[in-house]
């Protein structure tokens, strides 16, 4: 059984994202222990984006340091791209607790990227953090469906 934490900056504000994420989380229950951790985002103005990114980064690295037994996979548009099949195989072979990190509106600090055990991307597009969380949870579900030979992935 997969042990997955999704660590994200900011809250899910749109009900439709929350409902879709909840649906995939429910589907994952037989296959994975899934936990969501939301860190507060830092309000920023144009002149303080770097400060907001660094302050959010400190919160993320603090969580990662306290949970050092988890394999940290950071989501970043410059990361490695997987096919669904390769992602499924990767998760099965990893066979350790995982924390996926989804940054906020200003992105991720250099310190967070340096702290990563692995950096992956969901898309070369920049995605809003709410959509990134939904795509991530769906892809985790798809990965376990592939590994379990469920008729979800065709």
Image: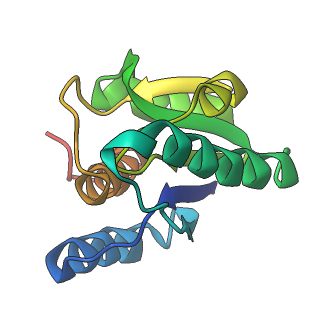
Considering only vertical position in the picture, is 106 above or below 62? above
| Figure quadrant of the C terminus | top left
Give the residue drawn at x 49%, y 73%. Answer: 29
Closer to us: 34 or 76: 76
Q: Residue at x 65, y 32 (%)?
A: 94
- In front of the other: 86 or 40: 40
Residue 104, horizontal then vertical, whole percent: 41, 51
Quarter where residue 130 is shown: bottom left
Taking the image as drawn, is residue 147 in sight? no
The x, y position of residue 54, in whole percent, is 60, 41
Q: What colour scheme was applied to this rendering of the protein?
A: rainbow
Tell me the residue at 39%/23% (across/down).
86
Res 15 → quadrant: bottom left
Q: Quadrant of the N terminus?
A: bottom right
Residue 134 relative to residue 106: left or right: left
Which residue ends up furthest to the front in the rendered image?
Answer: 47
Q: Where residue 81 appears, x then y in whole percent?
A: 34, 19
- Label count reads 0
Residue 116 position in % (x across, y down): 65, 28
**Please, is residue 121 above or below residue 151 in the view?**
above
Please tell me which residue lies in front, 93 or 42.
Answer: 42
Horizontal relation, residue 1 to residue 148: left or right: right
Can see residue 33?
A: yes
Residue at horizontal 40%, vertical 55%? 44
Q: Nearer the viewer, residue 23 or 133?
A: 133
Q: Is 21 placed above or below 88 here?
A: below
């Amino acid at each position: 059984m997969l042990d997955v934490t999704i660590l994200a900056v900011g809250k899910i504000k749109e009900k439709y994202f929350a409902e879709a994420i909840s649906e995939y989380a429910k589907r994952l229950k037989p296959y994975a222990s899934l936990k969501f951790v939301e860190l507060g985002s830092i309000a920023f103005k144009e002149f303080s984006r770097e400060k907001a990114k660094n302050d959010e980064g400190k919160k993320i690295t603090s969580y990662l340091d306290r949970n050092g037994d988890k394999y940290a996979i950071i989501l970043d548009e410059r990361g490695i791209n997987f096919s669904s099949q390769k992602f499924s195989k990767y998760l099965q072979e990893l066979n350790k607790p995982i924390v996926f990190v989804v940054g906020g509106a200003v992105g991720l600090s250099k310190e967070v990227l340096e702290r990563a055990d692995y950096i992956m991307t969901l898309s070369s597009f920049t995605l809003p953090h709410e959509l990134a969380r939904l795509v991530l949870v769906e892809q985790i579900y798809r990965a376990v469906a592939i590994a379990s030979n469920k008729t979800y992935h065709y």
